[in-house]
Image (spheres, grey):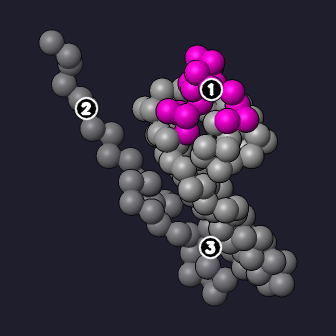
Amino acid sequence: MKKSQFSPEQIIKILPLAEREEQTISSICREYAISETTFSRWRRVYGGMSVNEAARLKELERENSRLKRLLADRDLEVDALKELLEKNPELDRAARSGAFPDGEGALNAPGLPVAGAQSLDLQLPAAA
């Protein structure tokens, strides 16, 4: 999409000219070299906003775009992993059971009990 030559702050300063009836929409459009369609779109998007709100809107739009790209990347990774598991059923079984394909055993993770470990059965002091 083409980048606007006007910042949101500039747009918000232009819109009230028509609302206060200082100028007609046609004269505003001629003065700023924009079409009436553009003016109507600005009014729909930025109408009634303050400069801070417009800046926040732009920030949220950028963040939304970034998150959509991250989600698309994650979807591609998931699809690639699914395809890999379909091609190699042994990896699929290992992933589901928590074992390595060569029979090494369960996967260990910090903070999780180890398979076959004994409980410590520690007594905690009574709360005062």
Residue 85 visible in the picture: no
Magenta stretch: helix, strand or loop mostly: helix
- Disc 2 target residue: 123
46 or 70, nearer to the observer: 46
Is 20 rendered above or below residue 31?
above
Query: Picture coordinates of residue 63 (x, y %)?
Result: 53, 50
Task: Find out whether residue 107 is within the magenta segment.
Answer: no
For the residue marked with disc 2, what is the amino acid? Answer: Gln
Depth check, mark 1 against mark 3: the one in front is 1
As drawn, the residue found furthest toward the bottom would be 102
Is tag 2's residue or tag 1's residue first in the polypeptide sequence? 1
Name the residue at 51% across, 48% down.
Answer: 7
Q: Which residue is mark 3?
A: 99
Q: Which residue was labeled with disc 1? A: 23
Residue 17: x and y in percent read 57, 26
- Between residues 123 and 42, which one lies in front from this camera angle? 42
The quadrant of the image that shows the C terminus is top left
Relative to 10, say whether 92 is above or below. below
Q: Amino acid at mark 1?
A: Gln
Decide which of tag 3 and tag 2 comes sooner along the chain: 3
Q: CA distance from mark 1 to mark 3?
A: 75 Å
Mark 1 and mark 3 residues within 8 Å of each other at the beta carbon: no
Three-letter amino acid code of the residue under disc 3: Ala
Q: Nearer the viewer, mark 2 or mark 1?
A: 1
Give how far apart the Cα atoms at labels 2 and 1 are: 81 Å
* Residues shaded magenta: 11-27
